[in-house]
Image: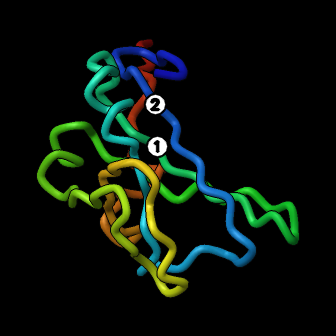
Amino acid sequence: MDFIVGNHKIDIKTTYRTVDPRDFYNCYVDVGVYESNNEANVYAFCSINSTTKKLFILGFLKKEDFDKKKKLIKAGESIGPKNIAKTVPMYSVLVSDLESIDNLKICQYQR
């Protein structure tokens, strides 16, 4: 977990790429980290284009939604357009599966 805002315990996951992200790209959470990080109730995903140095906030999923959408990528299994094998087991969701960060209600204002 990276930080707490209101009742959200947020874990931010960032992927470095050499291109801007697309809807069909994957977002990953290391299985070991996921299983040992029981506190987080929101996963937020970012991507950094290492060529242009741009940061993209891709979106988020509440843990229960992540659990419904995640797919297991086994260690040694290849995924993505470059067929890069994962060295550790990972859970994966598509960028298109994420909710807009604008939908994350983190504060309530009272008057």
Quarter occupied by the C terminus: top left
Q: Residue 44 carries which label?
A: 1
With respect to residue 90, does 56 lie above or below?
A: below
Give SS at disc 1.
strand
Dot 2 corresponds to which residue?
Answer: 11
Residue 7 location (% of width, % of height)? 34, 16
Q: Splitting the image into 4 quarters, where does residue 55 fall?
A: bottom right
Residue kind at label 2, given as amino acid type: Asp
Residue 17 location (% of width, % of height)? 68, 67
With respect to residue 51, does 15 lie above or below?
A: above
Q: Do the residues labelled 2 and 1 touch (CB within 8 Å)?
A: yes
What residue is drawn where x is 27% and y is 40%?
Answer: 62
**Left or right: where 65 falls relative to 50:** left
**Left or right: where 34 falls relative to 72:** right
Name the residue nearer the viewer: 6 or 63.
Answer: 63
Residue kind at label 1, given as amino acid type: Ala
What residue is drawn where x is 39% and y is 39%?
Answer: 43
- Residue furthest to the front in view is 76
